[in-house]
């Protein structure tokens, strides 16, 4: 059915596919929401500080 080099190529393909799948799951469930949440908090903090500085003038 498979020769040994074809079997190794198939295993390499499955390994790369699996690593890519889990990396995408990790990015979509942890990294991207963390990045967006931090950006939103930083934006709100800057807006609040600007409003406070304007009020103090």
Image: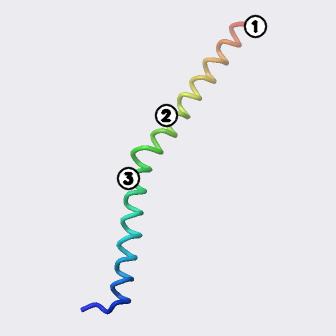
On the image, the x and y values in percent for residue 19 come to 40, 63
**Within-10-Å neighbours for mark 2: few <14, some 14–19, many 20+:** few
Q: Which mark is residue 57?
A: 1
Q: Which mark is residue 15?
A: none
Residue at 67% x, 18% y is 50
**Residue 33 falls in which quadrant of the image?**
top left
Residue at 66% x, 12% y is 52
On the image, the x and y values in percent for residue 24 come to 41, 56
> Which tag, 3 or 2, sits closer to the chain's start?
3
| Apparent side of residue 57 relative to residue 8 in the rendered image (left or right) | right
| Apparent side of residue 47 relative to residue 19 in the rendered image (left or right) | right
Whether the residues at callouts 1 and 2 have beta carbons within 8 Å, the answer is no
Describe the colour scheme in one phrase: rainbow
- Which residue is at the far front? 4
What secondary structure is found at the residue carrying circle 3?
helix
Placement of the C terminus among the 4 image quadrants? top right
User: Number of numbered discs present?
Assistant: 3
How far, Cα to Cα, is label 3 from label 2? 18 Å
- Which residue is at the far top? 56
Above or below, 10 relative to 37 = below
| Residue beneath disc 2 | 37
**Within-10-Å neighbours for mark 1: few <14, some 14–19, many 20+:** few
**Residue 46 falls in which quadrant of the image?**
top right
Q: Nearer the viewer, residue 48 or 27?
A: 27
Residue at 48% x, 38% y is 34
Q: Nearer the viewer, residue 6 or 40?
A: 6
Q: Nearer the viewer, mark 3 or mark 2?
A: 3
| Residue beneath disc 3 | 25
């Amino acid at each position: 059915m498979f020769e040994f080099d074809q079997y190794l190529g198939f295993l390499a393909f499955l390994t790369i596919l699996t690593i890519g799948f889990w990396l995408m799951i990790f990015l979509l469930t942890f990294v991207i929401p963390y990045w967006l949440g931090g950006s939103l908090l930083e934006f709100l903090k800057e807006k609040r500080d600007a409003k406070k500085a304007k009020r103090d003038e």
